[in-house]
Amino acid sequence: MRTGYLECFSGISGDMMLGALIDVGVPFDCLEQTTAKLNVGARLQMRKVSRGGLAATKVDVITLDQATTATHHAHEEHTAHLHGTHPHEHDADTHAPTRCHAQHRSLSAILAIIHAAPLSENVKHRSMRAFQLLGEAEAAIHSMPIEQVHFHEVGAVDTIVDIVCAAAGAEALGVDRWLSSPLNVGSGTVVCQHGTLPVPAPATLALLGNAPVYADGPPMERVTPTGAAVLQMLDVQYAKLPPIRIVASGYGAGGRDTPGQPNLLRLLIGEETDVTTTESIAVIETVIDDCNPQLLSYVSELLLAAGAWDVYRIAVQMKKGRTGTQLTVLCSPDLMPALRDLLFRESTTIGLRWRLENKVALQREFVAVETSWGQVRIKIARWPDGKQANATPEYEDCRKIAAEHSIPLKHVIEAAVRAYAVKERN
C-alpha cells in the first residue's frame, strides 16, 4: 500500500501543500497544466527557499492580468485573504510580491469552473468537495444560506488553484491512503473583517472537526481554512507514522521564515513494509487437574461470551503422573482482569499466569453470498494492497442453516464457497 504521510509540525496551508507535492516528485508541469485548464487567468511560479536552514519548495500563484503586482499566497496570508485582513500585517517574506485583489464568486460559480475544466473525475470530485466543505463552514458560522456567503475567501483565483492543484498532485502521486500527524494550529489572534479572533480562525476550526491539534512556536496562524479543506478532501486519517519504506520526502514552505520553528510542511511517501496489523493481546493460562471436563466446557463458553477472542484446552501430563488440562484464553488487554476473575470464580483453579504478546493479523472484511437455503457471510482476509489471502464461510451462519433445513453442514459450507466463487468472477 502506497501511503502519504503529512507531518504538520508547523501547520498546513494550500501553498505549503503544493510546495511539498512538487518537492516530493510531482512534476511542476502537472500543476502548471492543471492551472491552465482552470482558465482563471493564473499561472504558477516555483522557487527554492530556505526555512530554518532547510531547503524547501515555494509555490506562487500569479494572476496573469496583474503579473507585476500579483502575489503568492503565503502560509499566514490565507487568513488575510480568507477573512479580510491586510496581507502585510502577517507576511514576513519580503521576497514575495504584493497580493492582488480577490474576486467574489458564489459557490455555484466556483463549482462550475471546476466542472468545466478538462480534469479527471477524481480531481473534480475532490476539489468540488473541498469547496463545498468551505462553503458549508462559512454558511454555518454566519447562519445564512450557502449561496449568500460572500465568497471572496474561497472564490479568489489563488485559492481555486491551490485546491485543484492539490487534488491533481495527490492523484499524480498514486497514493492509496493519506495520514497525518497532529496539527500545529498556531496561537495568538488574527485580525479579520469580523474583528480580532483567536487562532484557529472560525472556518478553520469548523473544518478541522475532531482532528488532533496543539499549539507550538511563535504566535501565528499555522493551519489555514484552505489547508484544513485539503485535509478533508483527501480523507486524511490522523495516526502515528506506520511501518513504511520511504521512497520520497519533500518540504513545502510557507511565507515566513519563523525563528525556532521552520515554517514547513513535510511530506513522506512510502510503501508499507508490514503486511499485517499488529496489536497487543493478553494471554491467560492455567492448568487444572481436579475439574470435571464438562465444567471446563461451560467455563470456556462463559469466557467467549464475556469477550474472549479465543479459548482452547490442551491435555497435559503433570507431575506424579497426573493428567490435567491447560486452559488458554486470548483476549484484549483491557479484558484481562474481568476474565481472570471469571476463571477464579467459575473453575477450580487457584492460580494462573498471564502475559502480553503481539498479535499480527491480516485485514479482514465480510461479504454476504446467497445459497439455496439462505444468506451466508464470507470472512475475507486481505493483504494491505487489497489482494485476497483467503476466504472462509462463517461457521455460525452455516451451522444455523444446516440445523434449520436438516441438511449436512458440509453441504452448506460447500455451497457458500461455490456462491462466493461465482460472485468473485462476476
Image (cartoon, grey):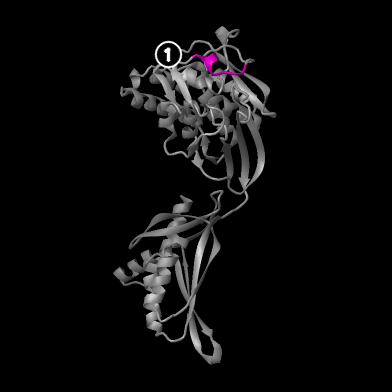
Disc 1: which residue: 104
The answer to which quarter of the image holds residue 408 is bottom left
Is residue 308 visible in this depiction of the protein?
A: no
* Total marks placed: 1
Q: Residue at x 53, y 16 (%)?
A: 89
Is residue 393 visible in this depiction of the protein?
A: yes
- Label 1 amino acid? His
Residue 252 part of the magenta segment: no
Vertical placement of 398 versus 92: above or below? below
**Magenta highlight range:** 86-93
Q: Position of residue 41 (x, y in %)?
A: 54, 12
Q: Position of residue 231 (x, y in %)?
A: 49, 33
Q: Position of residue 185 (x, y in %)?
A: 50, 32
* Closer to us: 332 or 389: 332
Q: Residue at x 39, y 55 (%)?
A: 368
Question: In the image, is 145 to the left or to the right of 206?
Answer: left
Question: In the image, is 253 to the left or to the right of 76?
Answer: right
Does dot 1 land on a helix, a strand or a loop? loop
Vertical placement of 52 versus 308: above or below? above
Question: In the image, is 364 to the left or to the right of 271?
Answer: left
Q: Residue at x 49, y 10 (%)?
A: 101
The answer to which quarter of the image holds residue 403 is bottom left
The answer to which quarter of the image holds residue 371 is bottom left
